[in-house]
Every structure is written in C-alpha cells, then in structure tokens.
Image (spheres, helix red, strand yellow):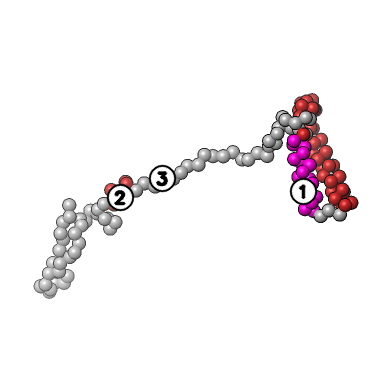
Amino acid sequence: MASVVTATTLSKGSTAGLCSSFHGSWGTSFLGEDHSLLASKSRVRVAVRPIRSAPVMKNVNEGKGIFAPLVIVTRNIIGKKRFNQLRGKAIALHSQVITEFCKSIGADGKQRQGLIRLAKKNGEWLGFLA
C-alpha cells in the first residue's frame, strides 16, 4: 500500500538528490490511511432522553379525604371555572385570617409562611383541594 516517493532536485543546477521520508500515497489525507477505518470504529453514542411533559402541580390525595366527595359534587354542579374562582377567594380569605392571627401574636413572616403551608397540607389531607 505504501509507496516511496523521492524528490530528485530542488533547483535546476543541483546534482545532489534529496530523499524523502514520506511513505504514504498521494490519495490519503493528512489524517492517515486508516482514518476511514478509525472513523467507522469510533462511533459516538448519544443517549436520547424521553421527552417529559411539563410538571403539573397536582394533589397527591386527589379524590381522597372526608370532604372530597362534597367538593367534587359542588364542582360538577356549579362548573369548574366558577368553582375555581370560589376556591381562590376562600384560600385568599383563609391566608388573610392566618396573617392577622400572626400579627396579633407577633409571629414573623417565616412562621406565617409555615402556617400557610400547613393549612394547604391539611386542606389536601381533608379533601378540600380534590
């Protein structure tokens, strides 16, 4: 496969021959003769991750809890849009009550946020957020 190429003269008047150490062929690239062989063996695997849907905030206890059946029936009767408006107003009112309670006992904002989170967790457990 390898052929020897020698350069004979550089200038017109030179009598000495120059020898080259090039042992490749002119048809190969500067990457070497085995480039195509190496390229076929060294394939890069790219892991393809499944496409995830956007995370949805959902109640873990949905449909559970003592008040869940009442909440579901009410939502079906008055409609989802109106129900969510009423639920939002009730949650806002309850948060205001918690805030006023924290002001009256002198609790700081961190404690107030903790009480609001506790109220949400209790609401989920009882089925109010079904």
Mark nearest the camera among 1 and 2 is 1
x, y percent for residue 122:
77, 39
N-term mark: 1 or 3: 3
Dot 2: element: helix
N-term mark: 1 or 2: 2
N-term mark: 3 or 2: 2
Badge 1 crowding class, 10 Å Cα cut-off, few under 14, some 14 to 19, many 20 or more, is: few
Q: What range is drawn magenta here?
A: 109-125
- Confirm whether residue 46 shows in the render: yes
Foreground pick, 94 / 108: 108
Location of mark 2 (residue): 38
Which quarter of the figure has residue 22? bottom left
Badge 2 crowding class, 10 Å Cα cut-off, few under 14, some 14 to 19, many 20 or more, is: few
x, y percent for residue 95:
82, 44
Location of mark 3 (residue): 45
Task: Determine whether 25 is above or below 54 in the image.
Answer: below
Q: Residue furthest bottom?
A: 13
Task: Give amino acid for label 1.
Answer: Gly
| Disc 1/disc 2 C-alpha distance (Å) | 61 Å
Task: Give amino acid for label 2.
Answer: Leu
Location of mark 1 (residue): 114
The residue that appears at 10% across and 73% down in the rendered structure is: 15
